Amino acid sequence: MTKREEALAQLPLRNNLVGLVPYGAPQIDVPILLNVNENTHGVPADVHAAIVAAVDVAARGLNRYPDREFTELRTNLAAYLGHGIVPEQVWAANGSNEVLQQILQAFGGPGRTALGFPPTYSMYPLLAGSTDTRYVTAGRSAAFGMTASATAAHVRDSRANIVFLCSPNNPTGTALGLDVVEAAYEAGEVERAIIIVDEAYGEFATSGTGSALTLLPGRERLIVSRTMSKAFALAGARLGYLAAAPEIADALRLVRLPYHLSAITQAAANAALTHADTLLANVEAIKEQRDRIVAELGLLGLSPAPSDANFVFFGGLDDSRAVWRGLLQAGVLIRDVGIDGHLRVTAGTEAETTVFLDTLRTLL
Ligand SMILES: *Cc1c(COP(=O)(O)O)cnc(C)c1O
């Protein structure tokens, strides 16, 4: 233990936080950052101009608290989502991580259980821990897939109160069939389980992959979570949101902090949403690079998982740590998700992807 760790151990920390390690994807200053699935194309010029103008106006009114109900933003998000979703069904917070935390604050807590299907998003157990929610896991089938019948059995057996379904899944990139979501929802009927479908990468799905947004009508315990951090190239703005039954938003109003979305955040997000088409213009280019990575890694004799996201998870490495270090030395940061022989890389621009693939080829 370091001195600081010893000092931390002396503090009267809550029991369920003792020994936990904070979320910590490395933030290293290298030329090519392909480690946290950001959109590497940058903010388009017209979106930048619109955000600057909107923030300029918002800044004049910063002596007042912002619209606590972020009405304009919920209206814009509902319009963007489509599928007949109305503003009352939309909720937002500072990143979808905060949305997920609010869901756990409202529906989790002491005596309640959340279920996840690893390998999946590393924040689920941390959010459960910080809200005193028990976190249990269930396995996946071959190639990290999930079937409707196995998922339903796990939901029933765990008696979970909250179920995390990540689709497309981080870190594997695989999207779930909607039959899996339906089966999880039905199996959760006994415990009245909240079923969360985390669609942070929904915009990158291959055509033919359905969104759980289509399943919302008649399912008041289903929540579809989205973010502006990935496809929308706005990770720095911190805006995540969900669509669900209006009473889900009412539940989250009980736990959100007053005025949790700053006037600056609301202005930036609203301005960006008026340019949704430009924001999404780079999504197709990113998908091309993703498909290129999958194809080329296969030719290198590695085993990339099929991906519906803006990243590729690949195995078949003898020494994944050494490959990760070798790439870093060449100025390319990718992600070691702690699974032996595997690494995850974000699909960048064409030039970034070329440097990644060329460097990897020399390291193998
Ligand atoms: C990146 C990511 C998020 C988004 O987090 P934000 O707080 O919105 O930036 C949510 N879920 C998954 C699975 C992710 O990979």
Image: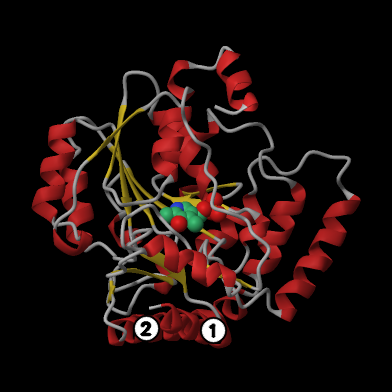
Residue 157, picture quadrant: top left
Q: Secondary structure at mark 1?
A: helix
Q: Earlier in the sequence, mark 2 or mark 1?
A: 2
The amino acid sitting under disc 2 is Asp
**Residue at point 84% right, 40% down?**
64
The amino acid sitting under disc 1 is Val
Q: State whether residue 261 appears in this view.
A: yes
Task: Please name whichever residue, 66 or 194, is drawn nearer the observer in this view of the structure.
Answer: 194
Residue 126 horizontal side relative to residue 29, left or right: left
Residue 294: x %, y % from top left: 34, 80
Which-is-in-front pick, marks 2 and 1?
Answer: 1
Residue 195 horizontal side relative to residue 152, left or right: right
Task: Please name whichever residue, 301 or 51, is drawn nearer the observer in this view of the structure.
Answer: 301
How are the residues colored? secondary structure
Task: Please name whichever residue, 121 or 164, is drawn nearer the observer in this view of the structure.
Answer: 121
Residue occupied by mark 1 = 355
Q: Is residue 331 above or below residue 3?
A: below
Residue 319: x %, y % from top left: 35, 64
Tell me the quarter of the image containing the C terminus.
bottom left
